[in-house]
Structures are given as structure tokens and as C-alpha cells.
Amino acid sequence: MWHSIVLVKQVPDTANISGKVMKEDGTVNRAKLPAIFNHEDKVALELALRLKDTYGGKVTAITMGPQRASDILRECLYMGADQVFLISDRKFAGADTLATSYVLSEAIKKIGEFHFVFAGRQAIDGDTAQVGPQTAEKLGIPQITYAEEILDLSDSKITVKRKIDGGQEILQSQIPVLITVIKDAVTPRPFSAKRVMAYKGAKALPDLEKMVEGNSLLYMDKLLEEYKERNLFIPTLTTDDLDVEVERCGLSGSPTKVHNVESVVLASGSHKKIEPNKDGLTQLIVELMNDHIIG
Amino acid sequence: MPNYFLDNQDIQFHFNNFDLREIVEIQEHEYTEAQHYPHAPINYEDAMENYKKVLEVVGDIAGNGIAERSSGVDEEGAHFSDGKVQYASGTMKNLEELSKADLMGMILPRKYGGLNFPFCVYITAIEVVSRADASLMNIFGLQDIADTIRKFGNDELKQEFLPRFSTGEHTGAMALTEPDAGSDLQAVKLTAYQNEKGEWFLRGVKRFITNGNGDVLVVLARSESGSKDARGLSLFACYGDSTVVVRRIENKLGIHGSPTCELQFNDTPAKLVGDRRFGLIKYVLDLMYRARMGVSAQALGISQESYEQALKYAKEREQFGKAIYNIPVVTNMLMEMRTTLESNRTLLYSTAKYVDLKENYEELIARLKKEGKPFSEVNDKLKRVTKIANLLTPMTKYVLTESANKIAYDALQIHGGTGYMKEFKVERLVRDARITNIYEGTSQLQVVAASGGVINDVLSEYFNECEKKDYPAGLQRLANFLKEIRGLFNDSLKYVLDKKDSTFQEVASKDLVELYSYVYTGYLLLNEALKDQRKVFIANRFIVNAISNARKNAESIKDELFNDLLHAEKILV
């Protein structure tokens, strides 16, 4: 049975940034931003679901993040994911792409046998496009980035169309493989009303912890049992569940340091007219070489 | 990312104040289905949460998908070639999304794949969808066709047809109208006959059939040969197979996405729905409640979008150095539109609740009968709500569809010359609104249908209760106005009845129905004003406006405006 694991991420809604959410140092105050499902990850999930619709199998969605990241896991269930996992631990906080892909790859290994890992090309907050490829490296499997269509799937090979500069490329890969997906590949399906009603109350471990914190009448073990029984528990993986070296996770495992954030406003300054003839062109080339832009 | 459910402050107000407990408790019958269906609610609160979440899905699809495709749908329209009807590509996409989202069987029972939602929630969904694309309502909003099979068909019929309605695989059509039987359905001629095995076949022509290309057709046909009136008509279900020929589709002013077909039935195999002879007098009349409510919700959706477009344009458009929004005449028009919009929504939901109660009491009585339990108490309740639903349904359709035209008209006016151009959405809204006060019974027929209840003053109990209430000082003035309108109504009614002139009464009915609607809607708004400070403004404008209209209505009766009907021939040269 084909098994796809989809990497999803909750991101700040950067399309709706207002004055209030920018801190004085130019960084984003995430707590004040509405958090949304990273669109390309949703497209990746759709592609995985379509693969399942055509060839059968199951789809698992996973995300690494804090308690509220369980929002998007519920959305994955609404769309049709068969199971979801939240990877959540204070020790995972502050991770860059290296630490993130390390934890994700360990989580994938833990979840079990898989044939495909799908991910969005990149997330709209960091825009690095690194987590997918790095995860493939750590899992030791091939990767196809910028995918837009699955053309064929046979017992041992998958054929994928990917976007490249100025055209498309058709690649065939062995299985398992990691595939990152671009936003125009497919339109994500709407939530299914029945699944929304069935899974609206699904909760991950940190959700339940929060409920217990706010209510002295609730007990964790009982609550957990109840949610498991009602099939509404979102399995949650912490450092205890994964074979990870803690120093490679979170902030300690992240060599990337943000030195400075600048708000760059691109505006045109003075301009110079260059005649469209040989002299003008020569003058332009010389100038660009002097500025070390070319040459 | 507009969500047409979440971004509508007034729908939110109503939803948060909905008290559907009685309806839901009957409909969910002790919440036993939760054991078999993970999507069934475990209690009332859970059910309400379900409705809210699902309406959010509807709002998302409407605001982000359907609305974006609506201009394309209008432009392309449904088309007809080689005897086949093809939806506009946007309509196909809309239906695909709604089906995938499990929204095509909202009011059908779960065992047939439906969501088992109350009618009120379905009505909200129709409004939200219609705001995005009114023409889509004529497919999405036909779910009560399946519901008619559910209510009156036998188990075999339900098993055969309903599941595929729920999945969206099948769309339906209600084939009633014929070239010579429009408002007067008793004149239906299409013949239903039986072969020696007792199987039914249909032969004849239907016209102006909304979505007549649908996969399943519910057809009103004359099953009793030689009969001439309503009692010779029965209801049938059949497939839109090769024996049903679409002869043409109409080229319409609006709702281009909805194909309106002329159908020829050539010995089409059909199945009887319910009992013979009850087709029109029972089943179609029953369906009409819900169909009229559907069109009212469609009209409200168009009104909402017209208002949105006008407001947006008025804020953007600058003339004389300021946004026209700030020009008092324009501001006043917008406020008028907004008040009508909200008073209409109040009326719609109130009526929907009565229709819902009626449906549920009927179900409950059937259940109690089956269990051999007493049901007389529920029966009394049913009688009461049926009377009220009988009045409110046509009254609501009359008020909402007429004002949808007015709101769309004003929205175009606010756009000025620009609004007359195809580039702006508002001209489509004007065209789409125009059918709502014609089909499913014209406004004139709604007045006739409502006048019985008005003459019998079926809401008097409710009015008496309201009159006894102590309203806070600020609202007392409005309460006094409503008392005055009620007085005007009573005087006018007495005047009309005393006159004993049926022609005069027929024409004056419109004024009487309007007077009655002011009192009812006025009290609903006044009671909302007790819950929400902002609603005081809406109640105020509505009621102050109503008193001046009411005086006019009453005066045209008392001054015998309609006496000159006797001289019609001399005037109408």
C-alpha cells in the first residue's frame, strides 16, 4: 500500500501584515499575526491525496511546531489525510532549516515505512526552500523539487513533471522519493463537511495540556484516554519519542544566525538615459564593469 | 480570502442568536446517530458547532471560489448544442467543489449520505452561495427536490435516488410548468399512463424547467385521464434519460448559469411518488414552502452583494473632492439599503424557523404514531405553526424578492454611468434579481397566498404579546408606532371586509399584506434591538419608514383608490 508523508507548516499570514505586527527591530511579532496553512504545503497535500485517489494507499501529514500548529493538522484531516502527527517539544524551538529537517527526518523514520514524502516548495515565512531537500538528504533518498504533476506510478518508479526555467522537465525516480511541489500544481480541494464535523474536536498533546492547565477538574490521563477512545487524539511526538540527539535540535542545533533584519524599500533613484546605439552600449558596459556588477 | 459566512456581521448576529434547540432535538432524535456516524452531533451544542463549521466551509467556497468564477459563468452561460445542455465551465467547477465538500445533501438524512441539517441552516447556505453567484442557487438550492422524494416517496424510491443526490452525482429538476400551465398549475396536461404491468410512463411537454437537464426529474402529470382539475394530478420521479428530449434552452435576462429547458417526454418510464391524485394538492404545495424560501434566500444573497458593491464603490469613488459615500444623499441610500437588507434577513430567518418547526413536528408526529404514542399536543403545535408558515412564506417571498430588485436598482444608481456598463458586477445583480419576484410564484400570487393569513390575523397572539411588553424608553416610541400601524391595519381590514367587493379586496390585498409585514418585521427588529445596541438604529429606521408607508397603504384603501377598476376599459385605451 502506497504511503505518502506530507510535511506541512503553519506560517504567519504575510499577505495580511499590518503595522501592528512588525516589531521595532523589523522582525515579525508572530503572536499577533494570523497563522495559516502554508499554501504550497496544502498543494503538496492535495497532490498526495490525488495520488491516493488514483493509486490507493494512505496519506499522513506531519508538522513540527507549537501547540497552535495543530490547527493545520485538523485542516489536513478535513481535506482527507488518513492520519496526522504533531512534532512538538520545547527543545525543538528556534530551529533553522538544518535542525528542522533533522527532526522531521527522524520523525519520518519513526512513523514507519513510506514511499513518498511530499512538501511544499518553500514556506512563505522563511522562503528558504531548504527543508524539503535537506530532509531528503538526511533520509538518504532522491528528491524531485518544483514538481507540478505526477505523470505515472509503477511498482518501482514514479514519473514526475517539474518546472524549470523556461519550461518543464520530466523525471523518473526510484521509490522512495521526496517531492517538493509548486503552488500552481493543483488547487487544493475544499474541506469535506463530514470530515470537518468528525474531526473538529481533534486535539494534540499540547492542546490537552492547555485544557488541563485552565481547568483543575480535568486530569491529563483521563482526558488523553477519552480523546483516544473517541478517535480524536492527534499523536504527538516529542524528544522522548524520537531517536534524536537533543543538541542537534532547536536553537542549539541551528547554525544559522540572523544578524540583522533590514526593511529594504526598493525605490528608483536618479536615472540616466543611454542612447540605443553602439556608443551608448559601450558606455553602459564600462559603467557596469566599474561598479563590479559584471565582469 | 473573503469568507461569505464569517465576513457577514449580520449573519453572524443571527447565527449567534439562533435558538434551534427544539428543532435540533427533534431532528437528531436523542442524538443516537452519533454512535454510527462520526460526523453526527453528540448534543445540541455540538450540533450548533457543526452547523457553524460547515457554514464556514460554505462561506469559504462561496467567497473564494464561486464568487471569482461568477462573471465567467454569467458571460459563458449554460449552453445547448446537439440536444445536450452544458453548464458553463465555472458552474461545473462550482458543483465539483460543493460535491467534494459534501454540501449537496445538506438536509437529507445521514443514511442517504446527507448531513441531516435543519432547514434554517440550509437557507443560510443558500443565501451565502447566492451572494457569490445567484444562478448557482438554481442547482445548489434544488436539494428540496430530493427532500420531496424523501418525504413522500417509498423506501425503494428513496434508496434508488437519494444517495446520488447527496454525493452530487445527480442534480434534480422539478418539472411543473407547461406552456398553458404557469401560475395555474391545475391546468397541467402532461400525461402519465400505465402499461398492463402497472408501470408508469410520461408523455407530453414541460416548459421553463429550471435545470431541466438534471439527472432526476420530479414531474407533475395528469394520471387520471379525463380529469380536468388538481385532483387528477400525481407526482412522478424519472431519470433524464434519452426519452426526455431537451428541445431548447431559454435565452434569459439573468441567471445565465442556470439552464431553463423545454422538455419533451416521450414515453418516459417513471415512478409514482406517494399516492395518486395528491401530486399538486399535497406534494407540490408542500414543496412550495421550501422552494419559495429558497428563492427568498437567493434574493437576499443578491441584495447582500448589491449592497457590498455599492458600499465599496461609494467609498472609492471621489467626486467634488470627496468620496461619494460622504454625500448625504448617497449615505442615505446606503443606509436605506442596509436597513432593508437586515430587516429582510430577520424576516427570512423567522419564517425559516416556522417552516423548520412545521417539518419537524410532522416528522415527530409520524414517529409518535409509529411508536403508538400520543401526539395530540404536538398536533396542536403543528396546526399553529402551519398557519403561521402559510402566511409568512409567501409574505417573505413577496417582501424579499421585491426589495432585492430595489436594492440592486439602488446599487446600480450609486455606481452612476459606470454601473450601466458590463465591466462592473452590479449590472449582473440587477438582471439576476429580476427573476426572483417572478418564479416560484409571482409577487402578485404571493400576495394572494398571504392574504388568507392576513385576513385571519394569524399573528395576533404574537402582536398582543409584544404590545404588552415594556420596552426601554428609547424604544417605546417605536413600539407606539407599531401599535399605530397595527391600528391602521385593523381599520383597513375592516374597511375592505365591510365593503364586500371582491375586486376591491383582491387589489387591496397588497396593501393589507404590506401593513401586516411592517408590524411583524417591526416587532422582530424591536426585539433584536433589546439584544444588540446597533440594531436600535436598524429598528428605528425600519419602523419610522414603515409608519409613513403604512399611512399611505391605509389611505389608498380608505380613499378608495381602487374604485376606478370598474372603469378599467375606459382608462386602458
Image: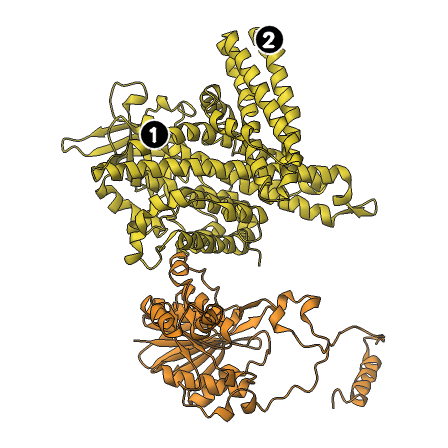
Chain colours: A orange, B yellow
What is the residue that sits farthest to the left in this orientation?
B196
State which quadrant residue B216 falls in.
top left
* Side (left or right) of B572 relative to A260: left
* Side (left or right) of A244 relative to A230: right
The 10 Å Cα crowd at callout 1, few under 14, some 14 to 19, many 20 or more, is few
Task: Choose mark 2 or mark 1, whichever is in front.
Answer: 1
Give the SS element for disc 1.
Answer: helix
Which residue is rendered at x = 35% and y = 56% of the image? Answer: B42
Label 1 chain ID: B
Q: Is residue B191 visible?
A: yes
Q: Position of residue A11 (x, y in %)?
A: 56, 72
For the N terminus of chain B, the quadrant is bottom right
Real-space CA distance between mark 2 and mark 1, rounded to the nearest whole angstrom: 44 Å
Q: Position of residue B211 (x, y in %)?
A: 41, 40
Which residue is rendered at x = 57% and y = 46% of the image? Answer: B10
Label 2 chain ID: B
**B291 over A112 or under it: above or below:** above
For the C terminus of chain B, the quadrant is top right
On residue A30, which mark appears? Answer: none
**B94 over B216 or under it: above or below:** below
Q: Amino acid at mark 1?
A: Asp
Q: Position of residue A68 (x, y in %)?
A: 51, 71
User: Mark 1 sits on what residue?
Assistant: B380
**B438 over A173 or under it: above or below:** above
Which residue is rendered at x = 30% and y = 29% of the image? Answer: B279
State which quadrant residue B239 falls in.
top left
Q: Position of residue A211 (x, y in %)?
A: 46, 69
Which residue is rendered at x = 40% and y = 39% of the image? Answer: B356
**B562 over B390 or under it: above or below:** above
User: Mark 2 sits on what residue?
Assistant: B564
